[in-house]
Image (cartoon, rainbow, N blue to C red):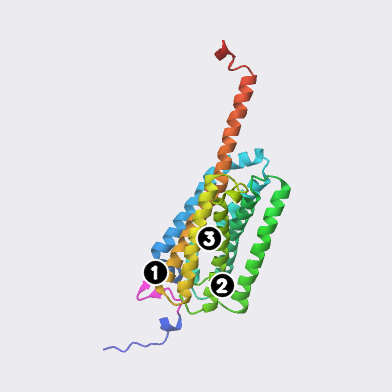
């Protein structure tokens, strides 16, 4: 046999280069491999991406018509909420698309920041809607907008501060869910977080079913259904955090399922509950205006002859 000289040859050892794109003779990006086979699996990631992308495309398809209606309206609440929904929807789409960052070495900081801002944005929408509900009617003035968003900003600001302390001072991976129950402080925080939200939604649900307090809330079935859905979602998430903190595998599966439901369905639920009726009412209002103008112009005089 011929002994070939080894000088000038570059030997690549995969163990010395964990980020190498050469895997068992195949070329594969680590991030792409993580997206397909790690980080909760292909079905989990595809469900999140398709749901969030579909909702953003729906918002884009309706944007021209909705913006026209908002510009003709006088509701500061609806204008601000619609803009906030757009911003949070784009953040949520980015969060769903970059799921591989959760399992990619060196991406801990961008993943934590993206997760922190995305979850905080969605919490802001939750708190804003709760504050709006507790006002009892469709407040549209600038004072109502300031009051609603001030309360929401205060609550979300405190939540961001607490999570930032856990993330960057204590080093607790709040947004990395591949390790089920090794961080008790993490699951204790999530348990407390869900406990507060469950208590708030449970209180509003009780008010809706109590004749004494029901009159103080908006008399719309959509709001009642929204409160019921969010109460069930947070109650299940609370149970999942408690079980996972005690090492139950079912708890972690339930928690992951609730996360998928929240990020895939919550923003469309907000739109259907809070904005869809408003835009539909604007359509009916415009039809009545057009009818009145045509009637004043004499278009229907022949019908009375």
Question: Looking at the image, is mark 1 or mark 2 nearer the viewer?
Answer: 2
Q: How far apart are the alpha carbons under marks 1 and 2?
A: 29 Å
Please tell me which residue lies in front, 297 or 7. 297
Which mark, by number, is residue 229?
Answer: none
Point out the tag, 1 or 2, that comes first from the N-terminus.
Answer: 1
- Residue stretch rendered in magenta on the structure: 18-29
Please tell me which residue lies in front, 276 or 82. 276
Q: How far apart are the alpha carbons under marks 3 and 2?
A: 25 Å
Q: At 54% from the left edge and 55% from the top edge, which residue is drawn?
A: 205
- Label 1 sits on residue: 37
- Label 3 sits on residue: 94
Quadrant containing the N terminus in the rendered view: bottom left
Q: Residues within 10 Å of mark 3 (few under 14, many from 20)?
A: some
Element under label 1?
Answer: helix
Give the percent coordinates (x, y) of residue 16.
Answer: 45, 83
Q: At 54% from the left edge and 74% from the top edge, which residue is drawn?
A: 188
Quadrant containing the C terminus in the rendered view: top right
Point out the tag, 3 or 2, that comes first from the N-terminus.
Answer: 3
Which mark, by number, is residue 189?
Answer: 2
Give the percent coordinates (x, y) of residue 161.
Answer: 65, 70
Q: Main secondary structure of the magenta part?
A: loop
Please tell me which residue lies in front, 142 or 229. 229
């Amino acid at each position: 046999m011929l002994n070939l000289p080894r000088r000038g040859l570059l030997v690549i050892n995969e163990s010395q280069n964990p980020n190498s794109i050469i895997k068992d003779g195949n070329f594969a990006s680590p991030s792409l491999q993580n997206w397909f086979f790690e980080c909760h699996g292909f079905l989990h990631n595809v469900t999140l991406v398709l749901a969030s992308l579909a909702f953003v495309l729906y918002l884009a398809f309706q944007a021209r018509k909705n913006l026209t209606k908002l510009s003709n309206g006088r509701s500061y609440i609806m204008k601000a909420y619609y803009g906030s929904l757009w911003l949070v929807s784009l953040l949520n789409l980015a969060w769903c698309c970059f799921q591989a960052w959760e399992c990619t070495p060196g991406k801990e900081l961008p993943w934590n920041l993206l997760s922190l801002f995305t979850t905080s944005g969605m919490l802001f929408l939750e708190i804003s809607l709760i504050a709006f509900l507790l006002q009892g009617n469709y407040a549209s003035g600038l004072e109502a907008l300031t009051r609603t968003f001030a309360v929401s900003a205060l609550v979300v600001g405190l939540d961001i501060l607490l999570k930032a302390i856990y993330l960057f001072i204590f080093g607790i991976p709040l947004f990395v869910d591949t390790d089920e129950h090794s961080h008790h402080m993490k699951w204790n925080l999530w348990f407390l977080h869900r406990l507060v939200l469950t208590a708030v939604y449970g209180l509003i649900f009780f008010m809706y079913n109590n004749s004494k307090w029901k009159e103080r809330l908006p008399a719309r079935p959509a709001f009642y259904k929204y409160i019921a859905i969010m109460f069930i979602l947070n109650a299940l998430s609370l149970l999942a955090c408690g079980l996972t903190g005690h090492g139950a595998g079912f708890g972690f599966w339930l928690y992951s399922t609730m996360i998928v439901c929240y990020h895939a369905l919550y923003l469309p639920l907000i739109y259907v509950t809070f904005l869809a009726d408003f835009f539909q009412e604007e359509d009916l209002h415009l039809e009545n205006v057009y009818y009145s103008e045509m009637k004043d112009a004499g278009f229907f005089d022949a019908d009375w002859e």
